[in-house]
Image (cartoon, rainbow, N blue to C red):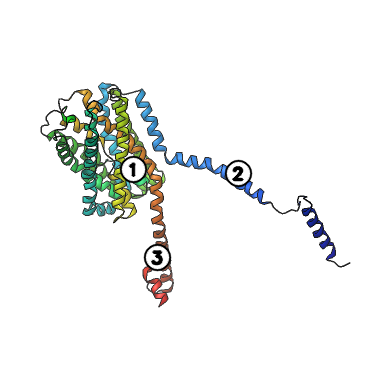
Amino acid sequence: MPVGAPLKGVEDNQLSLKSSGHRDTSPETPSGHRSNVSEKKQRRRWPLKMWDLVVDQWFLIVMGILIAIASQVQVPKSHQHMKQTVVNYLAVSVIFFINGCTLPTQVLIENLSRWKVHIFTQAQCYLLTSSISYGIVSACATDKDFMDPALLIGIIIVGCLPTAISFNTIMTRKANGNGALTIAQSTIGNLLGPFLTTALLKLYTSTGAWYTDILPETEGFTETYRYVFKQLGLSVFVPLLVGQVVVSVFPRLVKKVFIEWKLSKLSSFALLIVIWSTYDGAFESDAFSGVQSDNMVFVVFILIALFLVWIAIAIGVSWLWLSREDTIAVAYLVPTKTPAMGVPLTTIMFVGLSEAAQSRIQLPMVIYQGVQTTLSSLLTIPLRKWQATESSPRRLVQAETLELDDQSQDTGSPRRPAHNRSASTIA
């Protein structure tokens, strides 16, 4: 019998078994086993993805816990002014000191000199947001028996406020945007705030609309200017300058402390304290309890819509001529508003207004801080991915440039520009 005969017999037996319906027990790996393994891997991955989401959005989770605590336990009324002063100066100073230590001086100077971007951004921060908020209030203020006039004025004030001082800086960096541009714009915006915000409020509340009847006559704004510039100087400019001096004198120590030890996270905790302080004061003054439920729902939905409209317009018009990093910075500068100026501003401008009316006017600012914090934190995820799609080609170009540098050093020949490489190859 030939040598290949037994093998042929075995193959014939296997074919006959398959044709008769018997299962093949050969040692080949079945495809079903592979699919089971992939399903097990996917089941193991989704808890990790959920954990990554929780870690990424820890700021939002902690903020919710602090707001819940503030709703149950508040600082006594006799200590509210001291608490607000300490938080507004100390917590904000910590944020800008860390920014000063971690931000290169040259980058900050370059972004401060971009006057076209400054005009473009500040026009949106003041003119765009204030006109949209006033337009929505005018369209909705048709029923005197339904809406509280103080809430409508509060919505207008939100649109007139300058950009946030510290919040947008943290969110811009979290979304991999241009943090230096954000700091420059925040500084300029809050310098203009005492003048532009008061002028816009005077303009929009002098129209004779029925909801403005509750407001007293406004007098001079000297006290407003003094308060705002004092706070900016002590909590923004001085800490930022000190941070720049410290990083220039002790660069290695600063890098070790804030980069390797990751103590730059302290700025996020400082911002959480600012948010807690705002809600603590609102709950202590019973600002939420004096508002009807339907009015509260209306205000929340209007503020959410305003934020989404503002950030959509900011991204749409910025993307036409700015890089994605700059677009992310502008996207966080335009819709974010600072209650640090709005609360004292209304107190000083509307002297003689009842305490209950003051609380209701300030309520939209308090609610909007929660809205902008929640939505801004959630938007860091898609904005990071969007910015990474532009960064990838840039990294490839940089890697190609470094490779050409290494080759030129090895051969001793001058390096050709990267953008001419393909042309020289064709030639």
Badge 1 density bin: few <14, some 14–19, many ≥20, Cα 10 Å: many
Mark 1 or 2, nearer chain start: 2
Residue type for callout 2 = Lys
- The answer to whether residue 189 is above or below residue 206 is below
The quadrant of the picture occupied by the C terminus is bottom left
Mark 1 or 3, nearer chain start: 1
Residue type for callout 3 = Thr
Q: Is residue 365 left or right of residue 7?
A: left
Residue 249 visible here: no
- SS for callout 2: helix
- The answer to whether residue 46 is above or below residue 81 is below
Badge 3 density bin: few <14, some 14–19, many ≥20, Cα 10 Å: some
User: What separation in Å lies between label 1 and label 3 (alpha carbons)?
Assistant: 32 Å
Mark 2 or 3, nearer chain start: 2
Q: To which residue does mark 1 refer? A: 170
- The residue under the point 66% across, 48% down is 33
Q: To which residue does mark 3 refer? A: 401
Q: Where, by quadrant of the figure, is residue 45 drawn?
A: top right
Between label 1 and label 2, give the one nearer the viewer: 2
Q: To which residue does mark 2 refer? A: 40
Between label 2 and label 3, give the one nearer the viewer: 2
Q: Is residue 351 left or right of residue 377?
A: left
Residue 17 visible here: yes
Q: Is residue 139 left or right of residue 20?
A: left
**Spot occupied by residue 375 in the image (x, y as percentages of width and height):** 36, 40
* Residue furthest right in the image: 1
**Spot occupied by residue 331 in the image (x, y as percentages of width and height):** 31, 47
Nearer to us in this view, 31 or 282: 31
- The answer to whether residue 414 is above or below residue 195 is below
User: What separation in Å lies between label 2 and label 3 (alpha carbons)?
Assistant: 43 Å
**Spot occupied by residue 313 in the image (x, y as percentages of width and height):** 29, 47
Q: Is residue 244 left or right of residue 35?
A: left
